[in-house]
Amino acid sequence: MANPRKKRVVKPKNMPKTMTPAEKKSARKSDKKAQKQAALDQKEARLAEAVAATQSLTDQLMVISTVEEELHRADVSNQMAARDEAPQAAGDGTEAPPDAEGGAASPAPLNPSPVSAVYNAPPLQIPPLPKEMDAELARVMVAYLAQYKEAVPIDMEDDEEEEGQEDKRPVLDAEDFLYALGMLAQTDTNRELLFQAGVLEALLDMLRQSDLPGVVLDWLDWVIYTMAATAPIVKALWEAGAVSVMYRQLRTRGTEPSLVSLAMQVLATIAGEGLARPDILTRKVPALVRTAMRRYPQDVDILAAGLAFQCEMVGAHGDLVPIFLDLGVLECVKLCLDCPEFVDGTDVDVQDRSILLMQCLAKVLEGDKEGVCAQDPAMPSISSAVHRALERHRECSAVTEEVNRVTSLLSGTPYA
């Protein structure tokens, strides 16, 4: 007999049919796929915007850098021409005609140079540069860098493309992208945003790829060197393993001068903060630097970078002077002195190199407590080269000060 207390439930005829477990699973899968596609579309839209902005920035910066380079080259040429003409005018016995009011003779106009034509040209029609970026653009650019593969479009997701479907996602050339990234990193705000977005880790991970072409490695090193402008970033660079990456580059790509010089510059920057001393010495980086300087004795960039590395190491760790003397630091100084492109001339670059050379020599002499330098066979030629540098750069107060410091140390009297 049926239970009288149990009520019979009567369903209305228009009540919707309950979904089966298989149908529910299919619906959830469809919703998840739609959400994933929407997120992918949003990522691709942001990436396309970042790539377009970066490409536009790259084109504009290339124009500006070309003009600035021409201006600098023409300005230096103009200055040197003026210096060459000055002694000739003073020594030929002729005087310039006095001015109309009977005053002193006015100097003769300089020979026309390309710089005057550029200065008198109408202003370039260059749109304003987006010099300040926001956190989202920084994040997108780092994401692009982290997923970069040579000559392969960025794969934002692991989804498979349908057969026969063309991938139309934007791809930017690595060199253009890295150039724009480095130019954006010139400002403090942009550099901090990129740092917070994890650009150092992305750059170093990319450098660890062994199959990258040398030109891409060049740009990567340059961006890292540009980023290393503040002590916190340099420390983070060191903690992320930059020394091992640069050591590997010095050891395996030692026949590519630009890669060698950039690696030494990055190592010099790290050493200048007093970091990585055991790591650098354990890996015998100073020996690699000396080898590079011997291999390319006429390469100004390598000589300057090698000298900067030794200067920063000795300056940050004064007790390393005996070690660097044993490693031939004076021989490296002499290599620089024997390179005409390094010490001759009057342009700003040569003066900067001369200052660097004298600073390195001064730090070595100050740290030489045992008198090893005086017994080195290279010292007589180094002393005479120092005096020649004083005569050559007498008009430059910064070079003169450093040369005077070295001269005093050579004579055994401390520089006041």
Image (spheres, rainbow, N blue to C red):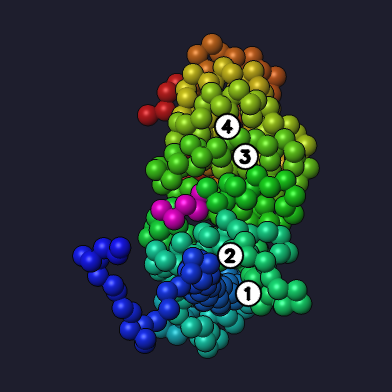
Q: Label 4 vs label 3: CA separation? A: 19 Å
What residue lies at 56% left-to-right and 13% top-to-bottom?
A: 371
Q: Amino acid at mark 4?
A: Gln
* Badge 2 or badge 3: first in the primary sequence: 2
Circle 2 is placed at which residue position? Answer: 156
Question: Viewed as shown, does residue 239 lie left or right of 255?
Answer: left
Residue 390 lies in quadrant? top right
Q: Residue at x 52, y 18 (%)?
A: 368
Query: Per the image, is 197 magenta?
Result: yes
Residue where numbered disc 4 is placed: 310
Please identify, in this view, whether the residue under mark 4 or under mark 3 is nearer the observer: 3
Disc 1 secondary structure class: loop
Left or right, 255 with respect to 129, comes to right
Which mark is first along the chain, 4 or 1?
A: 1
Foreground: disc 2 or disc 3? 2
Q: Which range is magenta?
A: 196-200
Residue 326 is left or right of residue 26, and the answer is right
3D distance between C-alphas at marks 2 and 3: 27 Å
* Disc nearer the start of the sequence (3/1): 1
Residue displayed at 48% across by 36% down: 239
Residue identified by numbered label 1: 169
Left/right of residue 228 with respect to residue 149 in the rendered view: left
Where residue 37 sits in the image (x, y, percent)? Answer: 53, 73
Q: Earlier in the sequence, mark 1 or mark 2?
A: 2
The quadrant of the rendering that contains the C terminus is top left
Dot label at residue 245? 3
